[in-house]
Structures are given as C-alpha cells and as structure tokens.
Amino acid sequence: MRGVVLVFATATLLAIAQEAPPGSPDRPLIDPVLSKPPDKNAQMQMQQQQQTKKASYEAANTERRRQIADDSSKILELATELKKEVDKTDKDTLSINVIRKAEMIEKLAKGVREKMKLTAGGPS
C-alpha cells in the first residue's frame, strides 16, 4: 500500500514540476474551468431573466406610448384654447391665462419629447 502511495505522490510531483510556468506560451491564458459554458439549468435561468426583462421593457413602452398619446391630446386641446384666447386679445395685451396655457403646453411637450426618447431606446 505504501508503495502505491509513494508512486502516486512521485507521479504527481513530476507532473507539477513539468507543468509550464505562468506566462509561458505552453500554458493556456484562460483557465479551462472558468471558460466552460454554463450548464443547462443556468442557461434556462438566464433565458427566463432575459424574457422577463424584455416583457417588462415592452410593458413600460406600452405605458409610455399611452402617456404620449394622452399628453399629445392635451397639448392639442390647450393649443386650440390658446389660439382662441390669443385671437380675442388685442396685439398689445396678453392675459395671465394665455401665458399659463403656453407654459403648460411647453411643459407637456418637453415631457412628450423625453418619453419618446425613452421609448425609442431599448435593452441591449
């Protein structure tokens, strides 16, 4: 029994001694253990996570599109009201209400632009 252990130990030491030193062209740069592809369970889990992210992104996009449509309708409504009020006033006088509506239109338009940027982008 001791002889078998001694032979095994000697063989192991010889294998270690003959192994290429770090940085040697004979030694692989990437550890084969680290470069193994994930097992099937891990692959399935990654696919499920990607599908969940995609579904979440699509739901968020759908909600943003709905908000853009609602805000665009509100902008149109406010712009129509603003036009009517401006037509009623004379050329030297603007009411506070006209200025507030113009500011509200500007705020909504900026919000629509930002939501459109978010909708146009996507997960990589």
Image (spheres, rainbow, N blue to C red):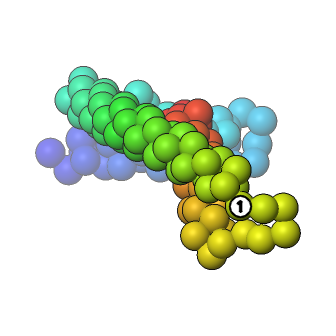
User: Observer-nearest residue: 17 or 94?
Assistant: 94
Residue 72, image x, y percentages: 51, 40
Residue beneath the point at 49% across and 44% down: 77
Find the residue positioned furthest to the left. 1
Q: Is residue 111 visible?
A: no
User: Observer-nearest residue: 7 or 23?
Assistant: 23
Left or right of 116? Residue 37 is: left
Residue 57, image x, y percentages: 38, 37
Q: Amino acid at mark 1?
A: Thr
On the rendered image, what quadrant is the N terminus found in? Answer: top left
User: Observer-nearest residue: 6 or 95?
Assistant: 95
Read off the residue under disc 1: 89
Q: Is residue 6 visible?
A: yes
Residue 36 in the image: above or below residue 14: above
Residue beneath the point at 25% across and 47% down: 5
Find the residue positioned furthest to the right. 92
Left or right of 76? Residue 36 is: left
Residue beneath the point at 70% across and 50% down: 87
Residue 28 in the image: above or below residue 40: below
Residue beneath the point at 41% across and 28% down: 37
Residue 42 in the image: above or below residue 112: above
Question: Quadrant of residue 108 in the image?
Answer: bottom right
**Label 1 packing within 10 angstroms: few (<14), some (14-19), many (20+):** few
Name the element at disc 1. loop
Residue 26, image x, y percentages: 72, 33
Residue 75, image x, y percentages: 54, 46
